[in-house]
Image (tube, rainbow, N blue to C red):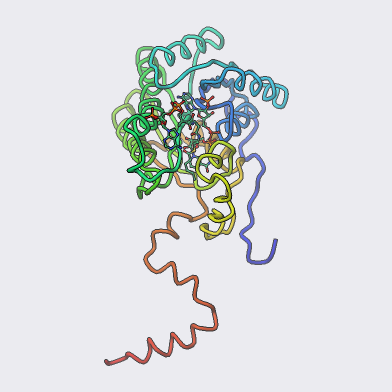
Amino acid sequence: MDKTTQPYSSAGMLRDDALAEKTIIVTGGGTGLGRAMSTYFLKLGANVVITSRKLDVLQKTASEMEQETGGKVLAVACDVRNYDEVEAVLAKTLEKFGSVEGLLNNAAGNFISPTERLSANAFGTIIDIVLKGSANCTLALGKHWIAQKQPGTILNIITTYAFTGSGYVVPSACAKGGVLAMTRSLAAEWGKYGIRTNAIAPGPFPTKGAWERLLPGDLAEKFDFKNRVPLKRVGEHQELANLAAFLMSDFSGYINGEAITIDGGEWMQGAGQFNGLEAIPAEMWDMLEQLTRGTKGS
Ligand code: HXC
Ligand code: NAP
């Protein structure tokens, strides 16, 4: 690490009991970022229910996570697009753990494509997984918590292009934008029931699932994400897990309706009109300064 590198820690941040006595459902919890966040929730004392479509993947992950953390994991197959399957996850969760306190809407589908190449079904598939899936889980848990007169915490994983939009991932951008709107809307509507709703917008955090679909072949080298980030690196999974655990925990009890970006400044770098001047070599600035000063009074 040279002197100009911003220091960072990839250690767990919260105290060991920060999520004790909480049961948290994590959609897409068997792989990638969902797995990383679930593992940290377990280390902090939570019970975790991981769901996705592939039961074999979930079961393997569950047993590895239990071994690593000593926590309790329930693996339940569920396609978040089907409301009855989501309700079944809730029922199995209550049967095993007695109560549920948190929902992490993390499951997603995505791939790059020029929009005009997409079939209507391709577009709809992404909307269904990301927006309808998050809505299904939120609705099932929200109805349950309101009926039980019990507080709850919802955390939605979005993306920074939920704010900006992005070409080549348009269905995902539309869906994540919808999840952001749901986050803010329910923060206002369900706060009175003691239900908090927040979101995290991660920048690039390498995972097999995302990289295979968004940077196939040699795109990963050609479109190296770390060059797009002012801090010149991608994120570490534990950094995201720290933020997610904080937002799930009672330590963030007054945070509601917030979307927190964790991207090393990536989207701001893309947004600022003159940020491209980064490409100008240091030695050229004397000449440019002379030119700009020379316009005085003109
Ligand atoms: C064009 C495609 C396509 C592609 C599928 N389709 N892949 N069209 N280009 N690459 C079309 C199919 O032809 C079909 O349309 C429709 O999409 C549905 O495809 P299925 O394969 O039947 O869908 P399904 O089995 O439900 O699989 C969903 C999936 C798949 C999204 C296509 O990739 C998946 O399971 N993904 C889950 C994991 C994932 O995507 N992880 C990455 C999240 S990363 P037709 O018309 O032929 O029927 C992320 C990061 C964001 O969100 C930011 C990163 C920095
Ligand atoms: P990932 O490993 O591919 O995770 C996606 C998960 O969603 C998988 O476990 C998948 O499991 C599950 N899933 C997909 N369709 C589903 C469905 N219909 N029903 C239930 N589960 C389904 O990718 P990841 O990178 O960890 O992504 C996790 C989250 O972070 C996503 O919301 C993504 O948009 C977000 N994100 C990631 C990055 C990044 O840089 N990695 C950046 C910004 C945002 P099955 O295939 O078994 O169903």
Where does the image place residue 172, in percent across and percent down from the top left?
Answer: 39, 38
Taking the spot 63% from the left edge, 66% from the top edge, the residue there is: 4
Residue lying farthest to the right in this orientation: 67
Q: Which residue occupies the foreground of this view, 59 or 5?
A: 59
271 up-or-down from 91: above or below: below
Residue 191 or residue 284, whichever sits in front: 284
Name, please, the residue furthest toward the left: 298
Q: Residue at 53%, 78% (x, y): give it.
A: 281
Q: Nearer the viewer, residue 185 or 280?
A: 280
All told, the count of numbered labels is 0
Viewed as shown, does residue 175 lie left or right of 20? left
Question: Going 48% across and 36% down the picture, which residue do you hit?
Answer: 252
Please provide percent x and percent y for residue 191. 34, 29
In this rendering, the answer to whether 227 lies above or below 50 is below
Position of the C terminus, as image quadrant, is: bottom left
Q: Is residue 60 left or right of residue 23?
A: right
257 horizontally vs 265: left or right:
left
Residue 116 falls in image quadrant: top left
Q: Is residue 67 above or below residue 203?
A: above
Q: Could you tell me which quadrant the N terminus lies in?
A: bottom right
* Residue 152 x/y as whole percent: 43, 23
User: Which percent across, then down, holds residue 204?
Assistant: 53, 47
Q: Is residue 289 left or right of residue 22?
A: left
